[in-house]
Image (cartoon, rainbow, N blue to C red):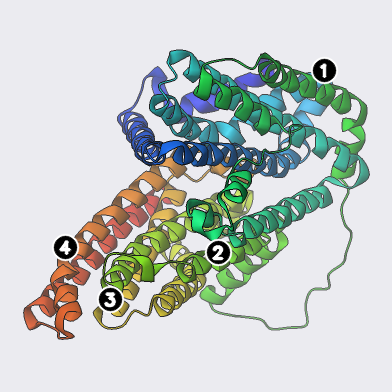
Amino acid sequence: MLLFRPFLFSIRNRFFRGSRISLRTAAVLGFGAVLFVALYLISLRTISYFHSQSELGIILSLKIFQMAWMIMFAMLIFSSMVSAVSSLYLSSDNEILCSAPVKEEQLFRMRFVTSFLYTSWMMVIFSLPIFGAYGTVFAAGWFYHLLVLLAVLSTALTASGIGLGATILLVRLFPAKQTKDIAVYLSLLFGILLYLVIRLLKPEDLADPEKFPDFVDYLSNLQTPGSALLPPSWANLLLGGYLQDQTVDWLAAGLLLLTPLILFWVGEWLMKKFFFDGFSKAQESFGGSRTFGGKDYRPSPLLRIFHKEAKLFLRDSAEWSQLFLVGALIVVYLYNFKALPLDRSPMPTEYLANLIAFANIGLAGFLATSLAARFVYPSIGAEGMAFAAIRSSPLPLPKYLLCKYLFYCIPFTLVILFLIIASNALLQITGPMWWVSIGVSLVITWSALALALGFGAMYADFKIESRTAAQGSFGMMLFMFVSLAMELLMLVIGFSGNYRLLRFWLRGGQIDSLALLLSIGTLVLIALIGGLASYFCLKKGLSSLEQ
């Protein structure tokens, strides 16, 4: 337990400073509870709709249930492999632990639990309302919810065991830094390929039996089981069987219980046998040389910060390799608009296209917030001890934050503009909605960037093990909650202020002067809200950095 005390103390000091729950911690927990309930209600409504469509709807809902388990398991394995290299071999406290009288298996136990909590807590917590909604719709009773908790925890622990074991074997063959790159590349490429294949197979066709030659082919496509050798298939067998006939598949339950224990023991053995050689390799440098002098290089502070940020980004393969995933997201994002069956809607196509275009503002804003959480929020804490050089340089902190903001603002703006313009072209949007979507999306994006930078400065941790560890911090959760709440407020105001303008345009192709003034005023109000929120967060972040 001594090895766990730093982790437990950091959690306590982060959320329960002074041995009591602070107001901000209570607010975050309350917001998380609201999000938990919202996920449950949305899942309940969706599953109830499928369940009400006779036997075919029940089969389809169970197919979605199976796919959810497979996706969750794949995501957990990728996340575990990427974070395991940093936690096992590249963590900053390894030198202290390896020089102390600590056995390899004891170190593995500590790393296993902490890595599991860092990589799986969000997936575990927010998958419970989704799977729990199935129990309510199928009237499975309270015992089903205990089985869900068992299956979710067992699947997450199995993924962590596989990720850590595979990492130890890879580091036995390659240096730790190269192994981290390999894990990142393989997991990203495999995940991207799986993501694209699933999307291009058009799973939405499963909701339309007319797409198949006959009904038997349709049912065979729906009822194709997953591989019985994978843990998510065991979870699906256990819970799916209980949902349908209230019986427990004891073989699946036994596999779910025993597999994490076996993987844990195997991981301990691998750690004891191979850890020291891998840790020794992790200390080796890659060599290289550099000749200084000969040039009078005096760029502006803006170019210096741009140069530094670009080098840090390109040197960290875990960062720039995620651009492949972002590219795949953009491809599927735009493909979804192309695949929309607008011509089959009972609503006029032009009305529906404009409604989807406005909803697309929220999707683009959510994407910008997610990318800001991944790249912008940890950027100040990632400076590490080198922040002392920035703090002691003749560069004022406000200018430093401005340069860092501009560095991320340029690519984020280009990505969001490309998404909005391309999706508007696929939806054949013309008129006011074209400009409204661009204006509101840019304000949301710029505000999300400023909030990420501000919260990243307020809660900067210059001794954090990796950027991945920052994803579960208190500041990150607070940023996500505040940013999403602000985006929702902007969307409500934007819809209310532009409804009159869009209605006049769709009915007669004309623009009412009063509606135009109201629309401009709405955009100004949204910009004012984003500007004030950004100013307040950046000012608080600047004050924290100065202190």
Instruction: Tell us which disc is closer to us: 2 or 4.
Output: 2
Q: Where in the figure is residue 492, as x and y percent of width and height?
A: 22, 57
Instruction: Determine the secondary structure under disc 1.
Output: loop
Neighbours of disc 4 within 10 Å: few (<14), some (14-19), many (20+): few
State the mark number for residue 332.
Answer: 2
Residue at point 19%, 60% (across, down):
493
Which amino acid, mark 1?
A: Pro
Q: Earlier in the sequence, mark 2 or mark 4?
A: 2
Q: CA distance from mark 3 to mark 4?
A: 13 Å
Which amino acid, mark 3?
A: Met
Q: Earlier in the sequence, mark 2 or mark 1?
A: 1
Which amino acid, mark 4?
A: Ser
Q: CA distance from mark 2 to mark 1?
A: 51 Å
Q: Which residue is mark 3?
A: 433
Q: Where in the figure is residue 294, as x and y percent of width and height?
A: 78, 82
Q: Which one is nearer the viewer's eye here, 414 or 534?
A: 414
State the mark number for residue 496.
Answer: 4
Q: Quadrant of the N terminus?
A: top right
Q: CA distance from mark 2 to mark 4?
A: 30 Å
Q: Which residue is mark 1?
A: 101
Residue at point 67%, 15% (across, down):
2
Disc 2 vs disc 3: Cβ atoms closer than 8 Å? Answer: no
Neighbours of disc 3 within 10 Å: few (<14), some (14-19), many (20+): many
Which amino acid, mark 2?
A: Val
Q: Earlier in the sequence, mark 2 or mark 3?
A: 2
Q: Earlier in the sequence, mark 3 or mark 1?
A: 1
Disc 3 vs disc 4: Cβ atoms closer than 8 Å? Answer: no
Q: CA distance from mark 2 to mark 3?
A: 23 Å
